[in-house]
Image (cartoon, rainbow, N blue to C red):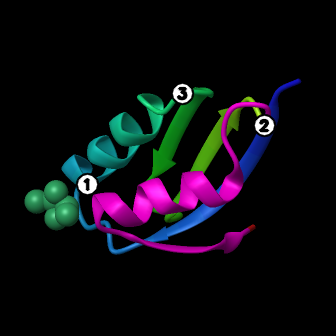
Amino acid sequence: VVSHIELGVQGMTCASCVGRVERGLQKVDGVLNATVNLATERASIEYLPSSVSPGQLKAVIREIGYDVLEEQ
Ligand code: 9UX
């Protein structure tokens, strides 16, 4: 089973920020794909819910240094 979540990510101001969040998410076990849109401040993540939870995905983004909004 594959799940999808959209998270609001605040605090990104350049393309390097986007890359940091994308790479940080993509290396998490259970994440299949992660793309981040700077203009809309959203992360789109495909993941295996058997391996990783939405709460863990949010925590990863916060650890990288950005604020996360509730899933949208
Ligand atoms: Mo860009 Mo983001 O210079 O934290 S990497 S502002």
Is residue 5 found left or right of 23 in the rendered image? right
Q: Verify CB contact (< 8 Å) between mark 3 and mark 2.
A: no
Q: Label 2: how many residues lie within 10 Å, few (<14), some (14-19) or many (20+)?
A: some
Please identify the quarter of the rendering in which residue 46 is found. top right
Residue 38 seen by the camera: no
Residue type for callout 2:
Pro
Q: Label 3: how many residues lie within 10 Å, few (<14), some (14-19) or many (20+)?
A: few
Residue type for callout 1:
Cys
| 51, 24: nearer the viewer | 51
First in sequence: mark 3 or mark 1? 1
The stretch drawn in magenta includes residue 54: yes
First in sequence: mark 3 or mark 2? 3
Q: From this view, report whether residue 53 is shown above or below residue 52.
A: below
Q: Which residue is mark 1?
A: 17
Q: At 82% from the left edge and 27% from the top edge, which residue is drawn?
A: 2
Secondary structure, mark 1, is helix
Q: Which residue is mark 3?
A: 29
Q: At 53% from the left edge and 64% from the top edge, which residue is drawn?
A: 40
Picture quarter with ligand 1: bottom left
Secondary structure, mark 3, is loop
Horizontal and vertical percent position of residue 60: 44, 54
